[in-house]
Image: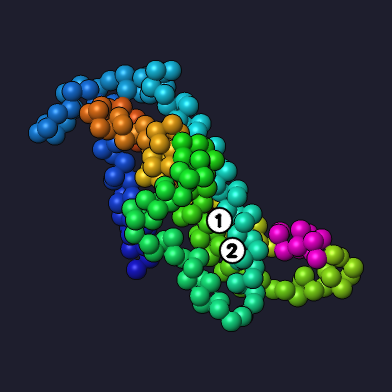
Amino acid sequence: MKRLVPLSGAAVSLLLILPLLPLIFRSIAHGWRFPDLWPQQFSLRAWAFAFSSGAGTGPALAETVIIALMVALISVVVALPPAQLIGQHNFRGKGLLLALIALPLLLPPFAALMGLHGLFARLHLTGTRTGVILAHLIPALPYAIFILAALFARLDRGYVAQARSLGASPWQAFVRVTLPMIRPGLMLAFALTFLVSWGQYALTLMIGGGRVETLPLLLFSTLSAGRNDLTGALGLIYILPGLIILALTVRK
């Protein structure tokens, strides 16, 4: 039985790594055409072009990072009050509130996107980074609220009460006692909402209107152009944050 555990772990790891292999080979392949099972020759030209100024990878990557960081930061900050309310208190209408928070995750994405585009157009937010950030908050914020609410529900409020009895103000108790206790949940919520924003394509395309170019948009345009080698290189760059966050999580 003990031997099966490492074997099962290796099998799962192989299953997770397997989808990356075609991207790796595609990024260094030149002249790999169907139905050939192996590339005709290998080349690093796709990688060289991906990091050149003409590819636009640098600006698209920077735009994606800025938007994802802003979405993650705003999501965590905005999620704290409702998460604490939901996690530590029982009140009438709590179930309805939870349903409303989860509603953006349950609605048909395309229908919700069309309604959101009409609203943002009236507010002159289409084609702007601000509009894209606000749009990304819609699918990201529920995850942050649910993660932090579950953490607040398990939080021992006796420490906060003890701090208050020693003369700490509500704000001091929150900063010095509550925040350190929920730090792992904050990091998890930040990482997850960052990845939610990082992976958005349709929202960025519709709200950004092509003026806000992120890495998913650049990747899709490269794929549509038939540049399979460049698509492989950009695809590996695109999945890098997820791998880094996974590695950091496993390490802890």
**Residue under numbered circle 1:** 189
**Residue under numbered circle 2:** 148
SS for dot 2: helix
- On the image, the x and y values in percent for residue 220 come to 31, 35
Dominant secondary-structure state across the stretch colored magenta: helix
Q: Earlier in the sequence, mark 2 or mark 1?
A: 2
- On the image, the x and y values in percent for residue 251 come to 53, 50
How was this image coloured?
rainbow
**Magenta region, residue range:** 170-180
- Identity of the residue drawn at 44% across and 38% down: 208
Q: Are marks 2 and 1 in contact (CB under 8 Å)?
A: yes
Say what amino acid the circle numbered 1 marks: Ala
* Figure disc tally: 2
- Identity of the residue drawn at 42% across and 24% down: 56
Residue 191 as seen in the image, left or right of residue 164: left
- On the image, the x and y values in percent for residue 236 come to 37, 35
Residue 248 in view here: no
Mark 2–mark 1 Cα distance, whole angstroms, equals 7 Å
SS for dot 1: helix
Dot 2, crowdedness within 10 Å: few (<14), some or many (≥20)? many
